[in-house]
Amino acid sequence: MKITENYHNNLSKTDPEFMALFDNFAFDGVVNQNNLTLDDKTRFMAILATLIGCQGIDEYKIILPESFNFDVTYVEAKEIVYQAVAYLGIGRVLPFLEATNEVLQKFGVQLPLEAQATTNSETRLKAGIQAQVDIFGEHMREFYKSGSPDTVHINQWLASNCFGDYYTRTGLNYQQREMITFCFLMAQGGCEPQLTSHAKANMRIGNDKQFLIKIVSHCLPYIGYPRSLNAITCINNAEKI
């Protein structure tokens, strides 16, 4: 994978030894590792989601314009940011949404982009339930009704908001949405139960174990070894469920 010479241009001047070390690992050793081949578009989508998850705003501003050189579309980039709100909250995602808009405007993109919503206030719950069933299985059909009386509303929100508002949007398919969700959870850490659940969901809809290991491996330079190893453990645990 060839990245432009503008990548970390300032650090290349002030910290050339470090940048040579990092670049040789991230853009040669990782990318060219045997059995870890991943198409560039998927790789960049995963990295963008991972940087949002770990709050790497400065690196995100560098990687986002690079991703457009590797077939990530403007709509796909926006959808990654939008979906992150369900897993990180607007408090952590707002800077990334603003940064994305700034980059797109520098590219001459007219905002807002074309609408991608397929649901409304009347249809979002039903559509969200179906999305959960499609991804996790039939046992999710009645999940929105589960829980104690004082917390059942959260499971209802999961169906109507997380899945009904976001997963039903066009721009990304289920496999891509589950992949970026896996990255959000992996990168922020402390979400191992949810990460295991979504690793299982990924496998169920076609993102198999080897694919997820590739995703973790290609994102490791951006989140480090501890969270990457935790993610591998969750993948292995999900395979046993």
Image (tube, rainbow, N blue to C red):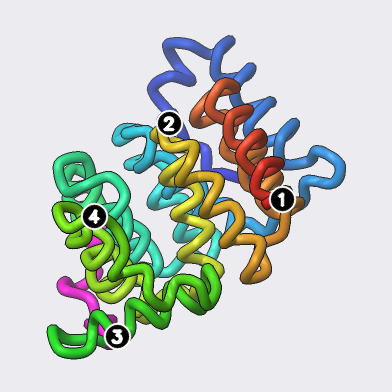
Q: Is residue 107 visible?
A: no
Q: Magenta stretch: residue 90 in it?
A: no
Q: Earlier in the sequence, mark 1 or mark 2?
A: 2
Q: Magenta stretch: residue 116 in it?
A: yes
Q: Which residue is mark 4?
A: 148
Query: How far is the residue under mark 4 from the one under mark 2?
Result: 27 Å
Q: Is residue 23 above or below residue 96?
A: above
Q: Is disc 1 in contact with disc 2, using a CB cutoff of under 8 Å?
A: no
Q: Which residue is mark 1?
A: 239
Query: How far is the residue under mark 4 from the one under mark 3?
Result: 21 Å
Q: Which residue is mark 3?
A: 126
Closest to the camera, between mark 4 and mark 1, is 4
Which amino acid, by three-letter code, is at mark 3? Lys
Q: Main secondary structure of the magenta part?
A: loop
Element assignment for label 3: helix
Residue 107 location, x and y as percent?
29, 62
Q: Residue at x 75, y 31 (%)?
A: 29
Q: Residue at x 37, y 40 (%)?
A: 53
Please state if 93 lies on the left or on the right of 35 as rendered.
left
Query: How far is the residue under mark 4 from the one under mark 1?
Result: 29 Å
Q: Quadrant of residue 200?
A: bottom right
Closest to the camera, between mark 1 and mark 2, is 1
Residue 82 location, x and y as percent?
27, 61
Residue 189's disc is 2
- Looking at the picture, tell me which residue is in the foreground, 126 or 141: 141
Q: Which residues are magenta?
A: 104-118
**Local crowd at mark 4 within 10 Å, few (<14), some, or many (≥20)?**
few
Q: Residue at x 45, y 71 (%)?
A: 140
